[in-house]
Image: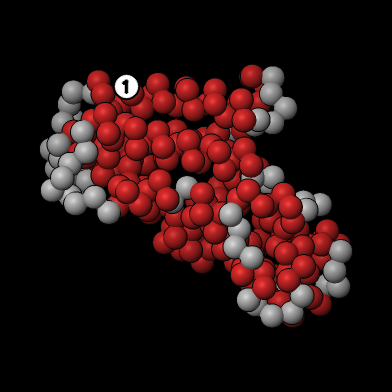
Amino acid sequence: MTKASDWDLLAVPASFFTDKGGDPDARQRLIMAGLEVFGAYNLEGATTRQIALKAQVNQAAIAYYFGGKEGLYMAVIEFAVGIIKANVLPAVIAIRDRDPVNRFTRREALELAQGIIRAFLGTLVRFPMASSWSRIVMREQMQPTKGFDYLYENVIQHIHRAFARLLADAHECDPEDPQMILRAHSLVGQFIIFLAGRETVRRRMHWQCYSADEARQIETAVSANLEAIFLYATNTPGKGNNQ
C-alpha cells in the first residue's frame, strides 16, 4: 500500500486528514485504498469490503468516517484535486490575474502554457497512483457523477480557461470565442492523453513507468506542439466562425 511519506512532495495539507475528527491515519489509509479500488472498479463496481481489506481497517470505518461508499468516493476526488490545486494551479494564477486589457505576447503565452504542462508532468511523475486517478477522471468524463461537478469547478475549468486566455491573446481575439474554447480543449488533451493513454506510450517507448527523465521527454514533445500553435499559427478566428 502507498505510504504516507509517498505524498510528502505533493503538498497534501495535513489538515485534510486531521480536521475531520477520528483517527487521521485510518482516514488516510481509506482514501488511498479508495483511490486504488475506485480506479480499478469504478464507483458502482467497488465494494466497501474490498476497500476496507486494502486499507486494513474495519468495514464499518467507511460509514463512520465518510457516511458510506459514495462519501468516500467524493473524499478521494477531493484529495486528488487538492494535489492538483497545490501543484498545478499556481501556474494558472498569473494568467487568471492578468488584466485582460494587458494581453500576453505570443512568446509569453507559449512560456506560460509550457509552465502548466511542466507542473502537470511533474505532479504526474511524483503521484504514486496516477494511473488509478486517470481512470477515475476518464470515467467521470464519460459517465459524470457529482464528482465531476467538483472536478470541473475546482480544477478543470481553471486550466481550460487559462489555455483559452493564452490562445486568445496569441491570436488577438476573445477567449470566449468558440474556436478558442475548442482549441483550449485540444491543448488540455495534449497532456491528459499521457494519463489516459499511458499504456500505449509505455509499450511504444519501452518504458516501465514515468520517470523524471521520461517526463522531460514528454515535455519536449508537447512543447514542440505548443510552439507550432502559439508562435507559427497565422489564422485568427472570428467570433462564431469555423476558420
Residue 29 coordinates in the image, percent (x, y): 77, 62
Position of residue 87 relative to residue 29, above or below, is: above
Q: Is residue 113 left or right of residue 145?
A: left
Closer to the camera in the image, 153 or 214: 214
Which quarter of the rendered picture does the C terminus lie within? top left
Please identify the quarter of the rendering in which residue 182 is found: top left
Position of residue 234 relative to residue 189, above or below, is: above
Residue shown at 72%/27% (left/top)?
Answer: 208
Residue shown at 36%/27% (left/top)?
Answer: 226
Residue shown at 74%/52% (left/top)?
Answer: 5
Residue 31 coordinates in the image, percent (x, y): 70, 62
Please identify the quarter of the rendering in which residue 22 is found: bottom right
Residue 242 seen in the current view? no
Closer to the camera in the image, 176 or 8: 8
Residue 118 coordinates in the image, percent (x, y): 48, 35
* Label 1 Cα crowd, 10 Å radius (few <14 / some 14-19 / many 20+): few
**Label 1 is placed on what type of residue?**
Ala
Position of residue 27 relative to residue 192, above or below, is: below
Secondary structure beneath disc 1? Answer: helix
Residue 4 coordinates in the image, percent (x, y): 74, 56
Q: Is residue 103 left or right of residue 229?
A: left
Q: Is residue 87 left or right of residue 64?
A: left
Residue linked to disc 1:
228
Q: Is residue 243 left or right of residue 112?
A: left
Residue 188 seen in the current view? yes
Residue shown at 54%/59% (left/top)?
Answer: 82
